[in-house]
């Protein structure tokens, strides 16, 4: 095969002028989208480098096409190719029905330990949006990809496995087991008797409790947050927000928040400031004579109602910040640092709508990231043009992918928007260091949408637009490069 493999050495990606890139065209609308997308990629590379660089595309199989040819949804050869060539791209895949692999996408992420799901979200001028100011949305989500409830450790209700977990809790953690509302036969029957008391018919009520585990580790948090901060600094972003539900899940989501701050100050002390530190430093900047106790009252409005021990803790925190980073971050210097802050997940879903400019880079756990990335995509035109990547920044492995489904009813009709795969390819080129080609794709996308030459999903919401086929939209992007 012509071309060379991308390699990783001493933490640096080494990309030859003619790299081999494995691709999975995808199921359903995947082939239509891939044909349009690959023309855009090749045109951008050709225009940017005048023939000095070229991608050698290497098709590998997964999903329905793989199953039809090999009777295997995810052949070993596909995994071998992604392991060997490091960087690849894929279209949407069908999830097999029944037993076996729960999701081909999740399987690829876990088998290659692609711990970051990277989802940039930005608006292109002219794209129809349900919000008043879609231009305020310019965020990059770092979603943890291997832990949380997506680890897939769960047991179906009524099975021997789920009962074994319930029995273990009952025997070893009776206090916690008592919180499983219908975890015993007596509790189930007691509720049924209440229902019968208001006229409900008799019935059997066996114990039926599905069980799931939510693993969240320090190292899993460390590598995600470290990657997010590194990205933010490299790309001159303003802030990294740790999004969590730690007010309820203190030892998983709450630990993620605490560990996130620890990673920030341990690995990036000179380059970052936490939001709370910025309050302390800002107060001192405004009043050089401000005492530590007065500063503590300003950062904690409930200070006067605290116990003496609690007050002493806050005062000690203020003194610690001023003594440790007062010289490097004080006198307004903290304003030039990367801000590290946190927000609760539910209020975040509200504030990305009402105060989008407050968010820049977001680091969060798997489930929160799933909700946030799709909610944000809706603000800028939908997942039809939402790109995504799954990356291991240590090994260099990365798979860039469509974030939408297979839409089988539109298969082979040359209708759908190829934007998600095209912009995922733009991310891939940027990851490879081929920024000139990546910039051309953004320019082409801006030009095509700005000229109102779009696929049907945008056409039906844009006044005076020209409806293009999937293939024609790709050609329009090339035209506007």
Image (cartoon, rainbow, N blue to C red):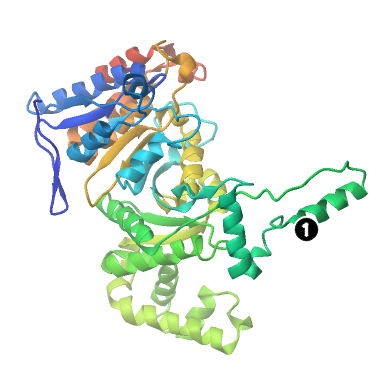
Q: Residues within 10 Å of mark 1 (few under 14, many from 20)?
A: few
Examine the rendering and report whether any part of residue 481 can be seen: no
Q: Across the whole image, how many numbered discs are drawn on residues?
A: 1
Q: Quadrant of the N terminus?
A: top left
Viewer-side residue, 164 vs 151: 164
Viewer-side residue, 428 vs 178: 178
Q: Residue furthest left?
A: 52
Measured as percent of width and height from the top left, residue 256 is found at 44, 61
Question: On screen, 231 above or below 98?
Answer: below
Viewer-side residue, 291 vs 229: 229
Question: On screen, 116 above or below 308?
Answer: above
In the drawing, does residue 191 fall left or right of residue 210? Answer: right
In the drawing, does residue 178 fall left or right of residue 213? Answer: right
Measured as percent of width and height from the top left, residue 424 is found at 32, 33
Disc 1 is placed on an element classified as: helix
Measured as percent of width and height from the top left, residue 7 is found at 13, 43
Q: Quadrant of the C terminus?
A: top left
In the drawing, does residue 181 fall left or right of residue 245? Answer: right
**Residue placed under numbered mark 1 in the picture:** 186
Question: On screen, 27 above or below 310?
Answer: above
Q: Residue at x 55, y 61 (%)?
A: 249
Q: Residue furthest front?
A: 160
Q: Residue at x 44, y 29 (%)?
A: 404
Examine the rendering and report whether any part of residue 364 can be seen: yes
Q: Residue at x 47, y 21 (%)?
A: 407
Measured as percent of width and height from the top left, residue 391 is found at 30, 44
Which quarter of the picture shows residue 431? top left
In the drawing, does residue 476 fall left or right of residue 437? Answer: right
Question: On screen, 119 above or below 279?
Answer: above
């Amino acid at each position: 095969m012509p071309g060379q493999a991308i390699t990783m050495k001493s933490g640096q990606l080494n990309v030859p002028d003619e790299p081999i890139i494995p691709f999975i065209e995808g199921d359903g609308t995947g082939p239509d989208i891939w044909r349009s997308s690959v023309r855009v990629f090749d045109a951008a590379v050709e225009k940017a480098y005048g023939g000095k660089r070229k991608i050698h595309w290497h098709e590998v199989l997964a999903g329905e096409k793989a199953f039809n040819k090999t009777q295997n949804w995810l052949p070993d050869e596909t995994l071998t190719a992604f392991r060997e060539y490091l960087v690849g791209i894929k279209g949407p895949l069908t999830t097999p029905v029944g037993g076996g692999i729960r999701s081909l996408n999740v399987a690829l992420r876990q088998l290659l330990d692609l711990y970051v799901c990277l989802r940039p979200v930005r608006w292109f001028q002219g794209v129809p949006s349900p919000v008043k100011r879609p231009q305020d949305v310019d965020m990059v989500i770092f979603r943890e990809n291997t832990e949380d409830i997506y680890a897939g450790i769960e047991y179906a209700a009524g099975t021997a496995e789920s009962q074994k977990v319930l029995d273990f809790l009952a025997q070893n953690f009776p206090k916690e087991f008592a919180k499983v509302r219908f975890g015993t036969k007596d509790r189930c029957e007691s509720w049924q008797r209440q229902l019968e008391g208001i006229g409900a018919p008799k019935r059997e009520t066996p114990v039926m409790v599905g069980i799931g585990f939510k693993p969240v580790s320090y190292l899993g948090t460390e590598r995600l947050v470290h990657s997010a901060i590194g990205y933010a600094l490299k790309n001159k972003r303003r802030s990294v927000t740790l999004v969590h539900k730690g007010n309820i899940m203190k030892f998983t989501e709450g630990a993620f928040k605490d560990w996130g701050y620890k990673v920030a100050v341990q690995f990036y002390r000179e380059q970052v400031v936490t939001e709370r530190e910025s309050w302390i430093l800002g107060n001192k900047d405004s009043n050089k004579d401000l005492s530590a106790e007065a500063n503590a009252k300003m950062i904690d409005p409930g200070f006067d109602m605290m116990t003496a021990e609690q007050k002493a803790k806050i005062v000690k925190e203020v003194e610690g910040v001023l003594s440790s980073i007062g010289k490097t971050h004080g006198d307004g210097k903290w304003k030039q640092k990367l801000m590290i802050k946190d927000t609760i997940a539910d209020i975040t879903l509200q504030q990305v709508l009402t105060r989008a400019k407050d968010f820049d880079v977001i680091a969060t756990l798997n489930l929160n990231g799933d909700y946030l990335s799709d909610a944000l995509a809706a603000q800028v035109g939908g997942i039809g043009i939402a790109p995504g990547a799954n990356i291991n920044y240590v090994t260099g492995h990365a798979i860039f992918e469509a974030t939408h489904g297979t839409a089988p009813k539109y298969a082979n009709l040359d209708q759908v928007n190829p934007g998600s795969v095209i912009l995922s390819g733009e991310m891939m080129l940027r990851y490879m260091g081929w920024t000139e080609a990546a910039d051309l794709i953004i320019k082409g996308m801006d030009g095509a949408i700005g000229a109102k030459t779009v696929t049907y999903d945008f056409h039906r919401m844009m006044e005076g637009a020209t409806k293009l086929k999937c293939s024609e939209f790709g050609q329009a992007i090339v035209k506007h490069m």
